[in-house]
Amino acid sequence: MTQALIIEALRSPRGRGNDKGALRGLRPLELLAGQLHALTERTGVDSAAIEDVLIGCVSQTGEQGANIAKMAVLQARWSDAVPAISINRYCASGLSAVQMAAQQALAADGLAVGGGVEMMSRVPMASDQGPLTHDRQLQQERQLVSIGLAADTVASLEGFSRQQCDDYALASQQRALAAREGGYFRSVVPVLAADGSVLLERDETPRPQTSAQSLAQLEPAFAAMGAKYGIDDLLCQRYGLKAITHVQHAGNSPAMADGAAAVLLASPAAAKRLGLRARGRILACADASVDRTLALTGAVDASKKALARAGLSASDIDLFEVNESFAALMLHYMRHLQVPHDRINVNGGAIALGHAMGATGAMLVGTALDELERRGQQRALVALCGAAGLAVAMVIERLP
């Protein structure tokens, strides 16, 4: 079976997703356009040769509305001949965009771009006021709960303690800081202001001051919500639990972030015609949807499907890049796929590096390739879960 090639995978550094973030002065289309421009600059590709651009973006409203993918293509001064579409598969959007772009490249025997953008400092989560977050009737009828409460429920079902979750979160911070200081993130493209000055050249989200003691002092983030609205009782009844153990808090949950990413995909024949050297290839992809209430366990299911399609097992994968939706979900992933901690998110994850919702999946493609190249290893699996049970996974292979 013909496999799509990954020619290049670039991302912005992640900025803090609040009013103190270094990127907050930029519009989302400018942040994404910078990555698109860098993609053609680095590869030498004429934008007119690109068949399609697919961009993940979760909160498609305001500055991120009206098909931000096409607006960023225009901002990047790409050819008017380049079509573009914005997609929303919640937090899995960026990787789904890469997957769909790979399919487009193969179908057209050409080039396509997949990526993502989210600026949570300017367009906060749930700004679109969609039914997932704002339709109380739907939430009650279909038992859709806060993803934080879903994470606490998974921890309760699996028996994960607050200490285990905090230990994982501390490791994420330490790994991210070591990777940032070591220059491991080759895929990062500095973000420039209009005058050419550097706004941000490395991730600003990791917190060097994090310690076991500081994490232990944080209050559970979702306990009050679970008690006030009777959601804990509903969850206990649905899953046969005596109580919900609230283990998630601001320190072991993903940090909100600003970020953008762009990945150039090609069919093998197109890469040969254009003289493009590939960094990797996609061996298999899979989508999944699981229990809508627990919501966040789908990365396991999608990963198993992708591995089966690639004819591989978890033991054949050198590195796993899995979005750190919450610490409890990472412990769940490692347990159910039997992945040791020394092969998963080896340079930290969203707890430390931040989660720019629509962009994170595309960002992780570059992160995985960076580390495979640095270590001289062969295969990586990238996976993300999303709200309402959605998930996506991709197996990639480094090319020498």
Image (cartoon, grey):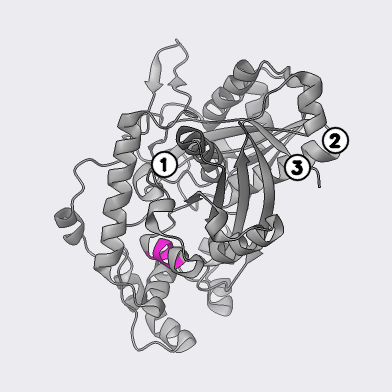
* In the image, farthest residue toward the right: 108
SS assignment at label 3: loop
Q: Is residue 270 left or right of residue 11?
A: right
How busy is the neighbourhood of tag 1: few (under 14 within 10 Å), some, or many (20 plus)? Answer: many
Residue type, mark 2 in image:
Ala
Residue for badge 1: 257
- Say which of marks 1 and 3 sits in front: 3
Q: Is residue 145 above or below residue 321?
A: below
- Name the residue carrying label 2: 108
Magenta segment's dominant SS is: helix
The residue labelled by disc 3 is 3
Q: Where is residue 56 shown, x and y percent of the image?
A: 61, 43
Which of the two discs, 3 and 2, sits closer to the camera?
A: 3
- Disc 2 or disc 1, which is closer to the eye? 2
Range covered by the magenta-colored residues: 328-332
- Whether residues under marks 3 and 2 lie with C-beta atoms below 8 angstroms apart, the answer is no
Q: Residue at x 54, y 54 (%)?
A: 384
x, y percentage for residue 260?
A: 52, 34
Label disc, if present, on residue 172 of the rendered structure: none
Between discs 3 and 2, the one toward the N terminus: 3
- Identify the mark nearer the N-term, 2 or 1: 2
How far is the residue under mark 3 from the one under mark 2?
A: 13 Å
The foreground one among 270 and 27 is: 270
